[in-house]
Amino acid sequence: MKAVVDENMEESYKRIIKISRIIQYTTAVAMALFGLFALGGIGIAVYPYDAEMIVSFHRSLIDSVNLLPSDLIRSFMGEDHLRLQVILTGVFIFLFGILLVYLIHEYRKIFKKITSSRSPFTRETSGDFRKLSNKALLICLFSTLLGLALFLLLRLFAYIFEYGAYLQDKADETSRIQEEMIMSLAEITENKSEQTGKHVRRVAEYSLLMAEEMGIDEDEAKMIRLASTMHDIGKLLIPDSILEKPARLTDEEFAVIKKHPGYGGDLLNNVEGDVMRMARTVALEHHERPDGRGYPEGKKGNSLSIEGRIVAVADVYDALTSNRSYKKAWDEKDAYEEIVKGRGTQFDEGVIDAFIKAYPKINAVREKLQE
Ligand SMILES: [Fe+2]
Ligand SMILES: [Fe+2]
């Protein structure tokens, strides 16, 4: 659902940017033409041309710019005071130009806001377009048709952005519900396995910090954080007697535990949505190693997803620094050394570099989210 909404919005967003560009180019050309006319008008007014030339220039000027005030003046004055009429027409063109420049300036401000924002469809932007459309009505004082056309176009933008904001709200709502469902699933898994309390939350935060450090796009980094919470979902299918055993596991029991990534993959098979698909990958890959000595499939290096490689580090670091029924938590410095030692073998090199850089933050999260 969210993906579909996002695609629609992306599509309309691209269209709006395209239309905006066209508007900007056409107004620039129109401005240049008006500028020429204005200059011509001033030139005619101050230079002593003969009367016939002024008559013909005035005709062509009025006919081409078609400004409401000039038309009115001509219908009043007829063919009298032509020089004055030309000057007045020049003044109107000038005022008209200033108004257009002002509107374009305002329009550019909105346009800038739209292009610099990650989620451009907001009610605020819709309001901006609405206000601008009202201002565009002033153009009607000079040219009724142009004023109305600009008004309608800007109003249309206002409606598009309002509808976009509505869709955005819906998408946010859907992802909030998805997020809540994911968190409950994570909680169920936690209650079932020996890991108590905040393991899942810490792994999620560590994963986010490393992803950010690696320069992964903000949305994707957040998705990794969320997806990571389901990494052990396969443990739901492992018998309690093994999960809750307060001692070291036998080889047979450990072989059963090692099935949980595969179970997780099965549980999340056929899921829809980006986060859920990523969760499936994480569940399947969080015990794999770049050197191929991980489980369940012994996948190697580049065949592992980036999210799988990140969560693998977060999960082990948290396992080392937490108490378990069969072991005490390691000292934080020893755990750090152990993780860094695995660079290129147990863990991905790039992820470990990010782990090292983000370590002060990771350590702070560990302290904050202690049991
Ligand atoms: Fe696991
Ligand atoms: Fe875990």
Image (cartoon, helix red, strand yellow):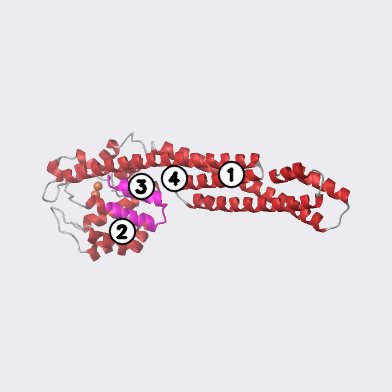
Residue position for label 2: 342
Q: Residue 167 location in percent, x, y?
A: 42, 39
Q: Nearer the viewer, mark 4 or mark 3?
A: 4
Looking at the rendering, in which quadrant would you find the C terminus?
A: bottom left
Residue type at numbered disc 3: Met
> Was residue 207 drawn as part of the magenta stretch in this picture?
yes
> On residue 137, which mark appears?
1
Which of marks 2 and 3 precedes in the sequence? 3
Which of marks 2 and 4 precedes in the sequence? 4
Image marks 4 and 1: residues in contact by CB distance under 8 Å: no
**C-alpha separation, residue under disc 4 versus residue under disc 2:** 50 Å
**Does 109 sit left or right of 204 as displayed?**
right
Of 238 and 227, the residue lying toward us: 227
Which of marks 1 and 2 precedes in the sequence? 1
Q: Residue 24 location in percent, x, y?
A: 62, 48
Residue type at numbered disc 1: Leu
Mark 3 Cα within 10 Å, few/some/many (few <14, many 20+)? Answer: many
Residue 297 shows up from this direction: no
Q: Which residues are magenta?
A: 203-230
Image marks 4 and 2: residues in contact by CB distance under 8 Å: no
